[in-house]
Amino acid sequence: MDSRRKFLQKASVALGAFSIVPAHVLFAKPEIRNKEGEIIKNAIVTPGDKVNLACVGIGNQGGSDVMSLFNTGLCNIVALCDTDMGAAHTLKVLEKFPDVPRFQDFRVMFDKMAKQIDAVLVGVPDHSHFPITMLAMSLRKHVYVEKPMGRTFNEVELMTKGAKKYKVVTQMGNQGHSEANYFQFKTWVEAGIIKDVTAITAHMNSARRWHGWDPNIKKFPDAEPIPETLDWNTWLSAAQYHDYNKDFINGQWRCWYDFGMGALGDWGAHIIDTAHQFLNLGLPTEVDPLLLRGHNSFFFPMSSTLLFKFPARGNMPPVDITWYDGVDNIPQVPEGYGTSELDPNIPPTSVGKIQPAKLNPGKEIYSKDLIFKGGSHGSTLSIIPEEKAKEMQSKLPEVPQSPSNHYANFLKGCKGEEETRSPFEIAGPLSQVFNLGVIAQQLNTKILFDREKKVITNNALANQLLTGTPPRKGWEEFYKL
């Protein structure tokens, strides 16, 4: 607590607004009980009341999240924060909530409004998830953070420990994790339909933002004038300084190792999530880049094939997950696969609507006795070939309906009414799988990982990348919260 208080004092002085909330007020957490007199776990508001939500990142995906959370009817939007309040992509949210206080720096927002905030949406680029989330949790605010949780393995580790330390409700924004596939996968595992899985093929083969860029790039793009409405310094967050360029912002950040996590970090949590959780995969022992077409040191390859090896877990056999991305890198599918249907609920990619392809985003799961195919997000699994599916039809258990979407699940979690389905304890190891995959991509080398010690054993540089480059001056304290 002392380090958090000192940090906030430093931040307030630096921002010219010294107004620290006393700890005995800030951390006061009165017991809230239901009508039977039972204490409601993690409750922050009385039953029937709404959650006071601050939104950090209100454009693009963040803007979509703001509206999705608001439309549940379970929250009040009490603060809006974005580093570029004048950008076109923020206007929809600003017009919807014209009287809500606005900020460009999340530190100022917390300094001025901490007592009025119950929970926080973090809908910003990958590299900024960590500091906002850690400060929010240290102030005992529940957090919904977009996927992937953090840009580095160590960030995710600290975020997961922070959620436990501060006893807050958390949810990572892989929206499909509260939809049909979650309940089907869970039910089929419990019923023994999905068992003895040995291999999974996962794929996202639509065009990405960096397709068409020169893969032989030798430097970062040249400096351009910073838009007058953009707080570039705060946008950079803890990342090392870069001169502004339009190809760093508005989704373009996902292209660069310094800011984003590529196709794997973007879509992996929508495709591998249920298998990772309900097969208890944890962390891999090996990540092998089988193909990196157009590899360079700055942004992600044009096409990637990554092999993740997971060891045996209890009575479950080892599992290999092979990840494919890139428009010219479509995996083979098993005989009897049938057509690749596109779930209409899947949102568009960064370059527009997904176009019909030989294979749409999804996975094939290979077990001892059965093969399953599925899409992404909440898309349900099918047994293939069709003849086998018909044979199994009478043996399939009834699957319960989802009681709440991902956004309502989070807010109900804040109210103590539900357990969140993608809390950091579940989403953290999943995100760390992607962190390890990105290291293998960036270095173009196989990495061997010790699951117990959480270190990379065969490459010193790769092991350093678990932590990444040191935070920029002035941002170190977030790593001590």
Image: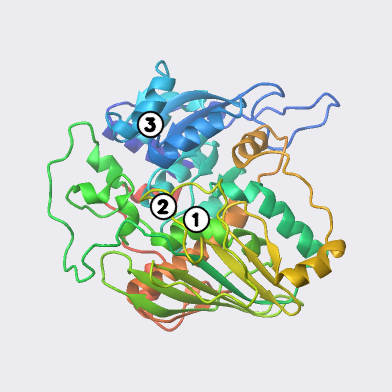
Residue 343 position (above or below residue 34): below
Q: Which amino acid, by three-letter code, is at mark 3?
A: Cys
Q: Which mark is residue 158?
A: 1
Q: Which mark is residue 81?
A: 3
Q: Which amino acid, by three-letter code, is at mark 2?
A: Tyr
The reply, left or right, for residue 389 in relation to residue 163 is right
Can you give x and y, in whole percent of width and height, for residue 204 in the image? 47, 63
The reply, left or right, for residue 296 in relation to residue 279 is left
Mark 3 is surrounded, within 10 Å at the Cα level, by few (under 14), some (14 to 19) or many (20 or more) other residues, namely many
Q: How is the image coloured?
A: rainbow
Can you give x and y, in whole percent of width and height, for residue 97 in the image? 43, 20
Tell me the distance, in whole angstroms, between the alpha carbons under discs 3 and 1: 24 Å
Residue annotated with mark 2: 479
Q: Secondary structure at mark 3?
A: strand
- Disc with the residue nearer the chain's start (3 vs 1): 3
Between marks 3 and 1 in the image, the one whose residue lies nearer the viewer: 3
Q: Which amino acid, by three-letter code, is at mark 1?
A: Leu
The residue located at (28%, 31%) in the rendering is: 15
- Disc with the residue nearer the chain's start (1 vs 2): 1
- Disc with the residue nearer the chain's start (3 vs 2): 3
The residue located at (82%, 31%) in the rendering is: 38
Residue 17: in sight, yes or no?
Answer: yes
Foreground of the two, 15 or 272: 272
Q: Secondary structure at mark 2?
A: helix
Tell me the distance, in whole angstroms, between the alpha carbons under discs 3 and 2: 22 Å
Foreground of the two, 313 or 408: 408
Tell me the distance, in whole angstroms, between the alpha carbons under discs 1 and 2: 8 Å
